[in-house]
Image (cartoon, rainbow, N blue to C red):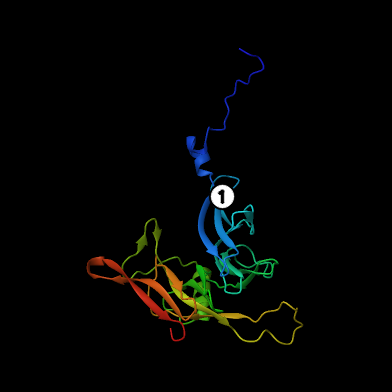
Amino acid sequence: MDSNASETPSTQPETPFHDLDHYLAIPRVGGLALSTDGSRLVTTVSTLNAKGTEYVTALWELDPAGKKHARRITRSAKGETGAVFAANGDLYFTSARPDPDSPGADPVSALWLLPADGGEARVVYSRAGGIGGVMAASAADATFVTASVLAGSTDEDNDEERRKSRKDNKVAAILHTGYPVRYWDADLGPAQPRLFAVENGGAAESGKPATVDATAPLKLRNLTPDVGGNLRNTHAVVSPDGKTIYTSLAKPLAKADTRFVLAAVDVASG
């Protein structure tokens, strides 16, 4: 035997498909977001963390012309998902990473914005129940989000108050009054998804000096307050003019059966 040869076999497989651990470590690409002018393309890439225990997501920008290398545009331990371009080129996404302007706050999935003309991403809206996803009209200044509310909540303030009460009293119980109560390996409830329009919340706080990048606060308007749990596991899109949201909607049937229908939500009236 050659004394210079290593007695330890190589740990690098011929291809990632020859070893399960290497196969699971292959980065996963999910979803594409194209700007309205077609000049920017963003995707979500999931990679294993250093311990190999979970996937962490990040946004990467691709060259639609295929001439430039892909580049990573977000980076955080919590990850980022749900990239959507607004009509003006701003990029919206959701993330539970800490907000630099609110240190010490409980981490929840918030709505972030990465300006079209450059600069760091910033939180544009955060709520106690988090933000599930974001949509933007391609030809209008109109943004929408999906977010969960506790059944029976009358408005955002009431929802936040009830969530705080559950947390403070360590309540984890869920009262089910209908079907389904579980989806695959996860219990459903107590929160239910809703569609919201993101709107101007009025003038910025007065009486304090403001920086040149100060923006007016935003608010959410519930477009589907009475839909119950029928928006679970559904998909929605917004029309280019931002006036209508089209969504699948679960329709309960007899004997615990369900079918899905297509519904149009008028943004102006709900």
- Residue 76 is situated, as x and y percent measured from the top left of the image, at 63, 57
- Residue 199 is situated, as x and y percent measured from the top left of the image, at 56, 81
Q: In the image, 187: left or right of 205?
A: left
Q: In the image, 145: left or right of 254?
A: right
Q: Is any part of residue 117 visible from this angle?
A: yes
- The residue carrying pointer 1 sits among few (fewer than 14), some (14 to 19) or many (20 or more) residues within 10 Å by Cα, namely some
Q: Residue at the spot x=30%, y=72% of the render? A: 251
Q: How many marks?
A: 1
- Residue 213 is situated, as x and y percent measured from the top left of the image, at 72, 77
Query: SS at mark 1?
Result: strand
Q: Residue at the spot x=46%, y=67% of the render? A: 171
Give the vertical position of 96 relative to 220 (above or below). Answer: above
Q: Is any part of residue 108 visible from this angle?
A: no
Residue at the spot of label 1: 47
Q: Which residue is farthest left?
A: 255
Choose between 15 and 87: the one closer to the eye. 87
- Residue 203 is situated, as x and y percent measured from the top left of the image, at 65, 86
Which image quarter is the N terminus in?
A: top right
Name the quadrant containing residue 218. Answer: bottom right
Q: Residue at the spot x=55%, y=54% of the render? A: 45
Choose between 246 and 170: the one closer to the eye. 246
Give the vertical position of 179 relative to 204 (above or below). Answer: above
- Amino acid type indicated by mark 1: Thr
Give the vertical position of 96 relative to 50 (above or below). Answer: below
Which image quarter is the C terminus in?
A: bottom left
